[in-house]
Amino acid sequence: MKLTLKIWRQKDAKSRGELVDYQMKGIEGDMSFLEMLDVLNEELINKGEEPVVFDHDCREGICGVCSLQINGEPHGPDRLITACQLHMRKFKDGDTIFIEPFRAKAFPIIKDLMIDRSAFDRIQQAGGYISVNTSGNTVDANAIPIEKEKADDAFAAATCIGCGACVAACKNASAMLFTSAKVSQYALLPQGQVEAADRVLAMVKQMDEEGFGNCTNTGACEIECPKGISLENIARMNREYLKASLKG
Ligand code: SF4
Ligand code: FES
């Protein structure tokens, strides 16, 4: 396949960025999207030019760092996969592909396609945990019965990989889907009840402080989420938040 890539190049957070054209040939359908970028970078390095900086780690849909906006969509045209799981067979010979970083005020660009998503870490640190007494009298978590439906919902919420596609897809750059998944995975389980009120208040406060926008129920986040995190989590977080606020 021959392709034209239009890739966002930006020196650092303060510099102005621009789309730069690259002509590619010999790209095979079985290559992953990131392998295609590896080929480009090898060519650039051989020419003595700066390679394109992009984030990647697991390359199998687990770590959530491959945050690429491909032809205007977070993680590209396929559903329920990350950019690293996207294959070049999804594109046609002669295609032009726009590759940009996820864009949000709370996700500043570090360089080229790499963004700083530490805002998500700070939301998680604000309350995305449970405190367990490890004195030796700890109750085995498996000794507490949990309804199957709730266990399934908690597990589904816990599959959020913190990629940020929900933020990139949202016209308000809202982080409600991410935060609600993290709140839900504890709110659904007995172990999460002790700190439930403090957790939701602290995580929502941190989310607002990081500069993410409000949710206006468009639902683009759910469509673009590679893990299929449901909007029901946002409704659950809103209920948890109301409950916690009334409790004072
Ligand atoms: S909710 Fe989905 S899109 Fe958002 S961070 Fe989690 S996995 Fe990524
Ligand atoms: S590189 Fe880990 S999810 Fe894509």
Image: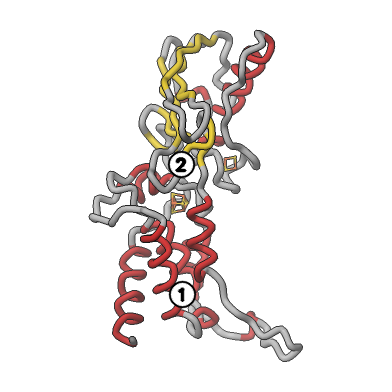
Residue 14 vs 65, above or below: the answer is above
Q: Residue at image x 51%, y 60%?
A: 122
Which of the two residues, 94 or 12, is positioned nearer the viewer here? 12
- Mark 1 packing: few (<14 Cα in 10 Å), some, or many (20+)? many
Residue 21 sits in quarter: top left
Q: Which residue is mark 2?
A: 108
**Is the Cβ of the residue at disc 1 closer than 8 Å to that at disc 2?**
no
Badge 2: few (under 14), some or many (20 or more) residues near its Cα, within 10 Å?
some
Asked if disc 2 is less than 8 Å from ligand 1, the answer is no
Measured along the vertical axis of the image, is residue 131 above or below residue 49? below
The residue depicted at 45 percent of the width and 45 percent of the height is 107
Q: From where the camera sits, is residue 7 visible?
A: yes
Between disc 1 and disc 2, the foreground one is: 2
Relative to 149, 64 lies left or right: right
Q: Residue furthest right?
A: 136
User: Residue drawn 53% across and 51% down?
Assistant: 118
Q: How are the colours assigned in the image? A: secondary structure
Q: Which quarter of the rendering shows the C terminus?
A: bottom left
Q: Is residue 121 left or right of residue 170?
A: right
Whether residue 30 is visible, yes or no, is no
Q: Is residue 88 above or below residue 102?
A: above
Residue 236: percent from left, percent from top: 35, 70
The Cα atoms of the two marked residues, 1 and 2, are separated by: 26 Å
Q: Nearer the viewer, residue 66 or 95?
A: 66
Residue sitting nearer the eye, 80 or 246: 246
* Picture coordinates of residue 104, whole percent (x, y): 38, 43
Which residue is label 1 attached to? Answer: 199
Residue type at tag 2: Pro
**The disc labelled 1 sits on which kind of residue?**
Arg
Q: Is mark 1 within 8 Å of ligand 1?
A: no
At 63% from the left and 18% from the top, the residue drawn is: 39
